[in-house]
Image (tube, rainbow, N blue to C red):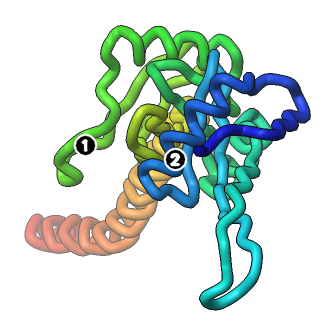
Amino acid sequence: DKRIVALHSSNGGLSGEAAQREIERSAGQGEEASWWYEEGKLYWVFTRPIVAGSGNTSRMLGLLAIGYQVDTTVADQLAVVAGNQIALETDRSIIASTLPQRDADELQRRIRAGLQASNPDPTLAPKTVSLPTDQYEYSTVLLGTGPSSVRCYVMMPLVGINNFMRRLNRTIYLLAASAILLGALIFGFVARTITSPLDDLVSGVQELAKGNY
């Protein structure tokens, strides 16, 4: 009858009523892994049958559901894999992120105000968003669907990259100006080296034409 007979939560965050509701939903949909969500906390839960006997004599005694809360530790692990900042959102709320707190709060406000998740056309320019401490280029991945759909925001900080590009551009401009100046000096020296004897020859011819030997 899918009635919970025992529940253990290490942080005490998942109530019996929520666990009963979610396990009934997961079992009804035949899910072996699903997202459970209650009061701002998200859990990634796996269900496995408890079976007695084997073959034709086997009988399912119940279900075992085991999982963990998705928090900043999980976000940190995803951030290492992605090489960027991570924010996990469900029910239009940020439930875990590696962003500075001010940026996470502002991102949640933007999401609730209707921030576009990502470009539907991958050929378009990536989306950017300006938050209190940085500007980010971001893309999103839908990790799960259903009552507790989870969206992962992969956020690449742009301020450091933009500063580096500005420094690189200044270096290129300085090198180009230096190359032009050096080229002009070399060209002037070569021009004088070539034309000075010719000037002397022309002057000599002109003097000879005047009879000045």
Q: Is residue 64 visible?
A: yes
- For residue 212, above or below residue 146: below
Q: Nearer the viewer, residue 160 or 45?
A: 45
The span from disc 1 to disc 2 (Cα, nearest Å) is 38 Å
Percent position (x, y) of residue 172?
47, 49
| Residues at discs 1 and 2 in contact (Cβ within 8 Å) | no
- Location of the C terminus by quadrant is bottom left
Q: Is residue 163 visible?
A: no
Percent position (x, y) of residue 70?
70, 38
Please report the residue visible at 73 percent of the width from the left and 55 percent of the height from the top: 64
Q: Residue furthest front?
A: 57
Left or right of 128? Residue 156 is right
Q: Nearer the viewer, mark 1 or mark 2?
A: 2
Please report the residue visible at 41 percent of the width from the left and 42 percent of the height from the top: 140
Percent position (x, y) of residue 33?
57, 55
* First in sequence: mark 1 vs mark 2: 2
Mark 2: few, some, or many residues within 10 Å (few <14, many ≥20)? some
What amino acid type should be assigned to the residue bearing mark 1?
Ala
Q: Nearer the viewer, residue 192 or 131?
A: 131
Q: Nearer the viewer, residue 135 or 97?
A: 97
What amino acid type should be assigned to the residue bearing mark 2?
Ser
Mark 1: few, some, or many residues within 10 Å (few <14, many ≥20)? few
Q: Nearer the viewer, residue 28 or 58?
A: 58
Question: Pointer 2: what residue?
Answer: 26
Question: Pointer 1: what residue?
Answer: 125
Percent position (x, y) of residue 83?
64, 53
Please report the residue visible at 25 percent of the width from the left and 66 percent of the height from the top: 199
Left or right of 131? Residue 206 is left
- For residue 109, above or below residue 140: above
Please report the residue visible at 67 percent of the width from the left and 63 percent of the height from the top: 48
Instruction: Check disc 2 and report its element: helix, strand or loop.
Output: helix
